[in-house]
Image (cartoon, grey):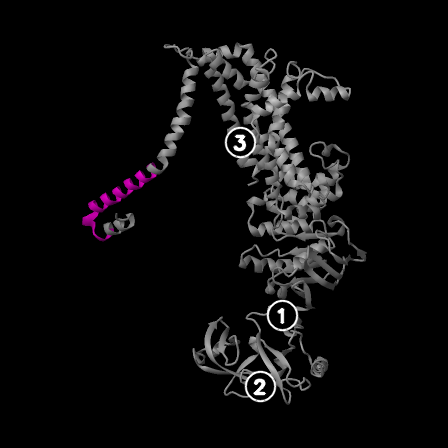
Amino acid sequence: MRSASSATAEAITSPADRGASQKALRRHQIAEMLAAWSLAGPALLLLIVLFFLPVFAVIAVALTDWQFGASSFTFVGLANFRELLADEVFRASFVNSILYVVIVVPGTIVLGLAIALLIESGKSFRAFYRAIHFLPFMATLTATAIAWEALLHPTIGLVNQTFVSLGLPTANWLRDENTVLPVLAIIGVWQNLGYAMVLFLAGMKSIPQDLYDAADIDGADAFLDRLRTVTLPMLGPVTMFIFIVVALKAFETFDTVQILTQGGPGHASEMLLYTLYRESFQYLRTGYGASVAVVFLFIVVALTLIQARVMDKKVHYQ
Amino acid sequence: MAAITIEKIEKSFGATPVLRDVSLKIADGEFLTLLGPSGCGKSTLLRILAGLEVQTGGSVAIGERVVDGVRPNWRDVAMVFQSYALYPHMTVQENMAVPLRMRRLSAWQRLPLVGRFRPGTKAVAAEIETEVMRTAKALGIGHLLARKPGQLSGGQRQRVAVGRAMVRQPAVFLMDEPLSNLDAKLRVQMRAEIKELHDRLGVTFVYVTHDQSEAMTMSDRVAVMLDGELLQVAAPQEIYANPDDLRVAEFIGSPKINKLQARVRDGGLAETAGTSFTIPADIALGTDVALGIRPEAFHLVEAGGHNILTGAVRLVEHMGSDLYVHLDVPGTHHPVIARLLAERAPQITFGRTLHLGVKPERLLLFAGDGRRLRPHDHKSASLVKMKERVQ
């Protein structure tokens, strides 16, 4: 095929051929467009089928009273969302999810950073410490949840036995509505800690030594001054990333609730994804469940937008 | 105001020695350049002066005070890094204020939010701001104070780094290749500015570079380092004209000095490349020496002979006012390079045979181990030779 530039050159030299050469140019453009579509097409198709269509389907279903398996449904507008607002269980679930995130995210970030700093400041057993802290993140939560259940058992669990021997007050951790959510949050922190730690360690590795040298010369040589002048600001992008990812993971918490508490006692550990699951697949109220999913989707999109905005402007120091 | 005394500094990283027995006295207010190829240990020596690196042996004194084991902060030194090492999250103003804030404000007063309500914070902060402003204006970066390093050009960042060092009025300025990230034109300009800064401040500057033109143009004295050893410390002109060591002679000067292997013959002559050169008479017969001839030491003569190299032109480089002529001289491994006046150009064409004369006083004579042989040294050299013969 002739290239666009040679076609243009011809057009200048012989005006009589202008029509023909313009045709060639057009053919070239079409071929380029076809190539572009055929390259981007498969990914676009997957994105539409696996992401956009389900999202639109969920939003559409959320506007109906469809029940799973039913042969008919009616359009109910925003009725599902009005019901959500009035629903005690959903409200408890929403508040619990927020509380859970509010404990898990800062807990994970602060402890993850602390452990990363400790590992980085020591010289021996670094790989070992990294590995044992990362292990919970690798392990199947379903399995570790059962281990936690055994640890937290009110009579024979290690936690209560330790507390008794130390003279501390004990509790039926997973059956007490005052303790169940904090305990689930602690498990959540335990699980995500290693992930945050590994990312922090990687972030620390990429901080130029020159900056620490400059801080030493400038007099910012005490631990806290170094932390504030160099380490923390330079970990900004990593921290933001961990914040978003852990927040998303915390909002998605399902397995610990399902295995350890089933949302109980009462609705003290009811969380968004668990409510969604129960409404949709246990009560088969698919339309109502879909409206919970829309709320969930809203939160996820909001977090992602925050990430995109803040990350580019505030933490990359451009 | 401080002189620096470096005594018998040794440094090794693990089993690898980086600095070997380096001793050096730097006068108060002097501009001293540590010059050497990369990996010669010059940056390590600078970092030891700064306190960022701890020496394996030896001692450093700044002013009257021995500073071994003293933290960088308490050595009264400021440093400019090759990467500038500006804090990317702070504005220029904040960057320059760091050294002052760390010194003049207590840990409580530096706390975010709460700090400004501690007694006295406001007055000190205002004072710091005035001083930063004054320094920034002096460096011509007053209008950049609100920007972050990411928004600055290389030259501007360099100035901010100098400003951050300057603002606290240190006794000693340490500079680690501060110009090597700049383009050639800016480098020449900043070179002059740093020199001016030194003249204005009058404090001791220790400047590390691998660029001989920086070293030659800026320094009061140049310390040439190679493989962790200090080879020679002298004024730039002295280093060039009167090197102590063949390695110094080879490192300084562009194009490189011509090195000819020669053997001493009867009557104070050194024989090389089919000719002979007059050398001081007291070097023992048969000694192997190296003759160093700077490219500009040659002058064109009509015919070959004693003190004259003869060879065929291999390449002519026109440099404007000068010509660099590469000559194939029989009996040498490398082409001999001569710097001649450009007006000779028409005569000098490829393949032509040229005769280059050298005045005996412009010959630099080196012993086999690279040590410079000066007239008063010759006796010891011949003694060495005699001892070898006896054995």
Seen from this angle, which residue lies furthest left?
Answer: A16
Chain identity of mark 3:
A
Q: Helix or strand or loop: what does disc 2 sit on?
A: strand
Q: Nearer the viewer, residue B59 or A175?
A: A175
Residue B138 can be seen in this image: no
**Which residue is located at x 36 percent, y 10 percent?**
A71
Q: Helix or strand or loop: what does disc 1 sit on?
A: helix
- Mark 3 residue type: Gln
Q: Are marks 3 and 1 in contact (CB under 8 Å)?
A: no
> Label for residue B247?
1
Seen from this angle, which residue lies furthest bottom?
Answer: B267
Q: Where residue A53 appears, x then y in whole percent? A: 39, 24
Q: Count up the numbered dots.
A: 3
> Label for residue A307?
3
Q: Is residue B69 left or right of residue A87?
A: right
Report the span colored magenta: A12-37
- Mark 2 residue type: Ser
> Label for residue B276?
2
